[in-house]
Amino acid sequence: MSQATLEIRAISGHAGSVPGAGVKRELEVCKLIDTTTCIGCKACEVACLEWNGLTFSETTFQNSYQTMPETAWNYWNLIKFNEHERDDGSLMLLMRKDQCMHCEEPGCLAACPADGAIVQYANGIVDFQQDRCIGCGYCITGCPFNIPKFSPQARKVFKCTLCADRVTQGLEPACIKSCPTGCLHFGTKAEMKELADHRATQLREHSGFAKAGVYDPSGVGGTHVIYVLHDASDPEVYGGLPADPHVPWTVQLWKKPLKWLGNLAIVAGVAGVFIHYLRYGPKTVPEDLQGGKP
Amino acid sequence: MSTPHLLPNGRVLRYSFHERLVHWMAGISYVYLLLTGLAFWSPWLFWIAAALGGAAVSSQLHPWAGLVFVLAVVRMYQLWGAQMKKTPADKAWLEAMPHYVRNEDESMPSVDRFNPGQKILFWGFWWCGLLLLLSGIILWFTDAIPWSLRFLRYFAVIVHPVAALLTIGLFIIHVYMGTAAERGAFGSVVRGDVSRAWAKRHHQSWYESIVGESSAKK
């Protein structure tokens, strides 16, 4: 049995069986981010840096409150700020905490060729195991959310772990712990969905946000990080949150049909030339047979 | 070519030292690329990377080996590009290919230095090599590609394995032809020479031009 406290449900680049597939009862965890009550204080950004002991590096100022343009290998949690002009001409400062979405069907894991470099725990957390990572960067291509980031120093890829180390010990992730407004929640997926739906209904019925809703994209099988948005019909305005994320179709084509076709073709090719030799033998030059080497 | 093709020992020089060197520069780098590539292609073959010094090392060296391969192929193009050009006679040879497959070589039209099969191999590796180079550069610097240009990654991730699979098909046939099937061919790319009979049998037009060339000198 695995020494890991968390049961493993899926393993990248893995040929054999998976130890934790359906063995134990385990609740699926979920982080709920209510963008309507976020004040952009960045306590979650600091808590993430502190708990994970990440290094500091220079960033780029882009005339906004946003700390840097996108998450980095040493910056896994970033609030995306967008001054959004609504249809009636009024302005809204949208703030969305961006980090790994912990997809139910993770594109990073599907694209990864290294055995065990990316695992999905039974509780839904998708975690990178840097000791197994080979630094190829395929996970970067597989991710529809632009989350995995390559560290040139380590030659490995890093991202948010949903504080798997804290969750193992029954603690909530560091970002949740630090949030002063309570816009961040952590619990089971079922509980968080219920809370999110409740909040969205409240926004629709009492706060004048007729299009308020919950972001839990089905294109990646749902996510273990879900959002409440003022306007769920246009997630793109929240710092580029994809409206309908999918694992890129070329990645799916490569990992499914092409893999089987390719394997079949290689085996058929080797068998074909072998059978040809059995049937027809070598090409010989008649004159050579009478003397001298070919 | 300055080196005379008819050797003093009565044999025919098929590939010069330079040509052999370039061939093996391509061959050895290709085998390394194939093995490490297959390791990343399928989890069932991941052990190959472990055997070659670890998967992290393999993924770091794979692109460099790719550059060596591309250099060799470019040099091959300079050496053989002109001789690999399609000629009107190729059509007849390709139509007669079932005889070639059945080893009925006496029924084949005579060919120059490279037969149309070899030309297909060469151009197959040339064009697939170009696709592998372009997609390979994108995959090598994946992290440097901005999010707005992510379609480049999506393109590379499918083009690279498709082009590689095509070269694997060519490679299987090439290795089979060059070792087991066509006796004398392997020696030609190692030692460089073939017997007169071999040259006459498989590349008659080429052989005749060599004989003509050497008798013209006398």
Image (cartoon, coloured by chain):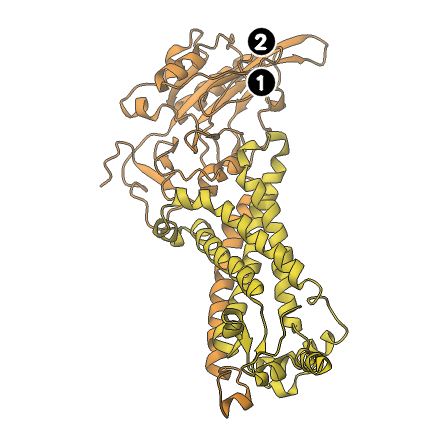
Chain colours: A orange, B yellow
Q: Which mark is residue A207?
A: 2
N-terminal of the pair, mark 1 or mark 2, is 2
Q: Residue at x 35, y 31 (%)?
A: A123
Q: Position of residue B125 (x, y in %)?
A: 60, 59
Query: Disc 1 and disc 2: Cα gap in Å?
Result: 10 Å
Specify the quadrant of the image occupied by residue B166. Answer: bottom right
User: Disc 2 marks which amino acid?
Assistant: Ser
- Asked if residue A250 shows in the view, the reply is no
Query: Do the residues bearing badges 1 and 2 touch, measured as CB atoms within 8 Å?
Result: yes
Name the foreground residue: B114 vs B130: B114
Left or right: where A167 falls relative to B173: left
Q: Mark 1 belongs to which subunit?
A: A
In this view, A169 is above or below A94: below
Specify the quadrant of the image occupied by residue B4. Answer: bottom right
In this view, A287 is above or below B47: below
Left or right: where B57 falls relative to B159: left
Q: Position of residue A177 (x, y in %)?
A: 37, 13
Disc 1 with disc 2 on a shared chain: yes
In this view, A47 is above or below A26: above
Q: Which mark is residue A212?
A: 1
Q: Residues within 10 Å of mark 1 (few under 14, many from 20)?
A: many
